[in-house]
Image: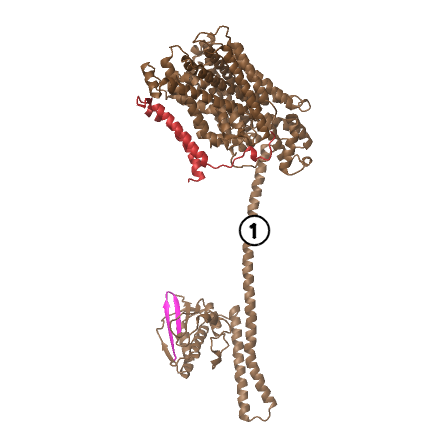
Amino acid sequence: MLSFNFVIFTAFAYVCLLFVLAYLGDRRARSSKSSFLRSPFVYTLSISVYCTSWTFYGAVGLAARNGLEFLAIYLGPTLVFVGWWYILRKLVRIGRAQRITSVADLLSSRFGKSSNLAVLVTVIAVVGTTPYIALQLKAIATSIQVISSAGNTAVPGFDDVPLALGVAAAMALFTILFGTRNVDAKEQHHGVVAAIAFEAIVKLLALLAVGVFVVFGIGGGFEAIQLKADAAGVDLFSGDIFGPRWVAILVLSAAAILCLPRQFQITVVENSNEDHLRTASWAFPLYLLLMSIFTMPIALYGLATLPAGANPDMFVLTLPLSTGNSGLALFAFIGGFSSATSMIIVATIALSIMISNHIIVPIALRRADALSGQSMTHLLLNSRRASIIFILFFGFLYFWLSGNSDALAAIGLISFAGVAQFLPAMIAALYWREATVKGAIAGTLIGFLIWAWTMFLPSFGNTSAWIAHVISDGPWSIALLRPQELFGLSGLDPLVHSVFWSLFLNTSALVSVSLFTTQSSLERIQANRFVDAFKRPGTEPANFVRGSATTNDLFFVAQRVLGEKAHELFHKLARQKGVQRKELEPTPEFIGQLERELAGSIGAASAHVMMSKVVSGTEISLEEVMQMADETQQVIEYSQRLEQTSSELRETAAQLQEANAQLRQLDLEKDDFLSQVSHEVRTPMTSIRSFADILLSHNDLSDTERQRFISTIHEESLRLTKLLDEILDLSALERGEQNWQNVAFDPEVALDLALNVCAPHILEAHIKLNIGDRAKHVSLDGDSDRLAQVFINLITNAIKYNDSASPDVHISSRIQSHTYIVDVLDNGPGINRADSRRIFEKFSRGRRQEHDVQPGAGLGLAISRQIVAKMGGTLTLESRKGNGAHFRVTLPTNH
Amino acid sequence: MADQRKLENIAVALPVFGIAMILPPIVGVFTSEARILGVPVIVIYLFSMWVLFIFGTYMLSRRLRANTVSDAEEPSDSD
């Protein structure tokens, strides 16, 4: 048996240990940034502030009354953490980016930094949380009474009121010491988190110890306990608990892990690294699993063995006590004590930040001399300290007044349902761009009122006859307004009834009011920042505040809020911009950044009010925002046009380059042509000149000699004329200036003409001429004489260059799918592959010109090709096996 | 190894699947009188689902990539 004084002393020693831990934690966090205090496991353990004494003791009680229903309280949060990637991660990201200090700040910041919404959320949080704090006090008082009393008799002289007052005072001292040490750009309390993490380990170990003791120490295993319970007629599994109430509790607990001020404080505000969520996502559900694994066996064993009437809520203590194991009972008591104190500490910090940032500071700011008076730092710290004392005193008062009534027993779920009213607005804040502040206020307010009427009020049913009357008959006997059968909805569990009506009307009001109201420009900007939290990492749009404040004015404001830390902040901001401290410019971007930093201390709404007091500019209107957006759009379009133009320019440049290369090539060709022409002209000219010289200077020449020289001069001049004719002809063809007449004619006639012209040469050269198949009834557009010229050229070439022993030339023509084809083949030496491209160029003759009896100028094929091209056809050298060349003329017919 | 997009889809599917598994009617299937090693089937079922969620989230959290921000990476801290 443990004496009352010993238990009190133990509790006192434990609280002292917490002070030391928090102090060391604070100091350690200050000295090094990467200490284990910032590890993901400390973060996970601190999240377990979710498990209060209500779950430590109450889960067993709930299991003893409603079977597995208690699991829903753990499974809801488990599923939220399983889905961490979408909700929690976004919350934490936004919380860090926007320097969010509380759940009220989150909603207020998203909905245009609205003060009204912040106040509403703060009030709901205080109303919902204070009874919960009272519940913790009651749990501590009850557990001390149980553990220090022999059996169920009350300890003489024991009064739980001063005890609760003492606990509340100790907690107030702790919270003030470690929760309000200073005002930071981030509301993080490493000392407190260290203490909370330690408490998380204590309560887990205590519960596991009791569980192992009950199951394996005295119970004899899971099966034995089950059998014992069966024998005692205890059946906790038969009722169908998986109905609407199961769903409602799942929804409530899932909402609570997001919306409870203390959870928000730990999960979002105290988060020092977004990546810690990665570990918490599975480690926190694992923690919950361990916390609940022995709950059912303890309940079963307690019901089966302890005398009827024993309070199931205290089985965790009474089972070790009943077997005289007071050491374990003391450990269990410390576990329960630690779960109660951790909840009180974190909830009080979270609430005090909300009260000071959203209620006290705005009131102070409304005073005209707010910025010229005493430093805001003192105001902030003092208002927080006052809030802490107020909250704890209020909690104590609630505990004192409600006395031994049952009003506290159900407060756990009632509190969950109260803060669950933030959920619709919170989800809208993260995902619905069009949600307006009016919608958020309407939804939250209606949800809160419905909750207060249908759930909070009935919890006092046993303490007041008037409330009992309202519950049974409705106010002023209006049955439709009965709290537990609102609007005539009856037959539901009161919890389900209240959760349904409050969340349904809350969401409906949020959606419908949002759809019928419009957002202010600030709301729209904030909505985009929240909804697109992942889309633009790192880049913050400039705050749309234009103004004329100087950097000094801004510094003055920052100093009011942060005190000496303002210097550090300005140096930091200057460093980020890469300028000296005094070169800082009060740009809109800088003002926005400063506002966010201040929001980290006093909340978004208050920071906004303060900044707008100094920055004498106005916020720009929605029209101006739209105009800016339009301008942006125009700039984008303009740059797209520029891009298009520049790509066109690039294309043109490439074309120009190509043309230039062609020109250069043509220039080369021209030079080539000129030099070749000169060369070709020079040869006959030289011979004409030298013969003429001989004729002039030698008078003793015989007549025959003279005759021979003159005829040579004649021949050479004829050749020269022919060459010049051909050059003129070719250049005329190339320039397209020739009098060209395209008339329909029969190309076979031209071919016959060419054969006739060539007949003497053929005879002379002893060539065998083979005429193959000939086309019939051909008609095409072009110049008959010119085509004959082409054929003559080809046939002449075939004769001229044929050095075969038995030379022969083969000529044939045919029609093939609207084209007229003439082939000229010889059995001469042929044209090797290297020359095959060159022969159509000007002045290129085949090889062996040195043997030529009658060398041409080398323009024949070039001219022929031009002629054929003019008529829309081609002149090609076909590849041929064996000896000889094969030329082909292809011309389109006119059908 | 699944790519990031797949993993993000799994990150949605897992909680949705989890919700379905612990709500009626599925949960009703296991509310029978039968016992395994003396423990009612429904208890075994709920706890094994729970372990499954934890394991699935554990596997997922090790593979999902994210561009995260931590205090240490920020240029300076005032505390």
Quadrant for the C terminus of chain A in the image = bottom left
**In the rendered image, is residue A866 in sight?**
yes
Q: Position of residue A290 (x, y in %)?
A: 42, 24
Magenta includes A813? yes
Please check the rendered image and state whether residue A853 is part of the magenta-colored stretch, yes or no: no
Q: Which residues are magenta?
A: A807-824
Question: In the rendered image, is residue A508 in sight?
Answer: no
Amino acid identity at mark 1: Ser
Report the residue marked by disc 1: A646
Relative to B6, say whether A595 is above or below: above
Q: Count residues near mark 1 (Cα–Cα under 10 Å), then give few for <14, some for 14-19, many for 20+.
A: few
Find the residue positioned furthest to the left: B34
- For the point 58% across and 89% down, the residue is A695
Give how far across and how far down residue A33 sits, in percent: 57, 31
Chain identifier, colour brown: A
Indicate the chain coloured red by its letter. Answer: B
Q: Main secondary structure of the magenta part?
A: strand
Q: Secondary structure at mark 1?
A: helix
Figure quadrant of the N terminus of chain A: top left
Residue for point 65% across, 21% down: A367
Image coordinates for residue A162, horizontal then vertical, percent: 54, 10
When asked about the image quadrant of residue A99, the answer is top right
* Camera-side residue of A277 and A415: A277
Q: Is A753 in front, or is A289?
A: A289
Q: Is residue A429 left or right of residue A385?
A: left
Q: Quadrant of residue B61?
A: top left
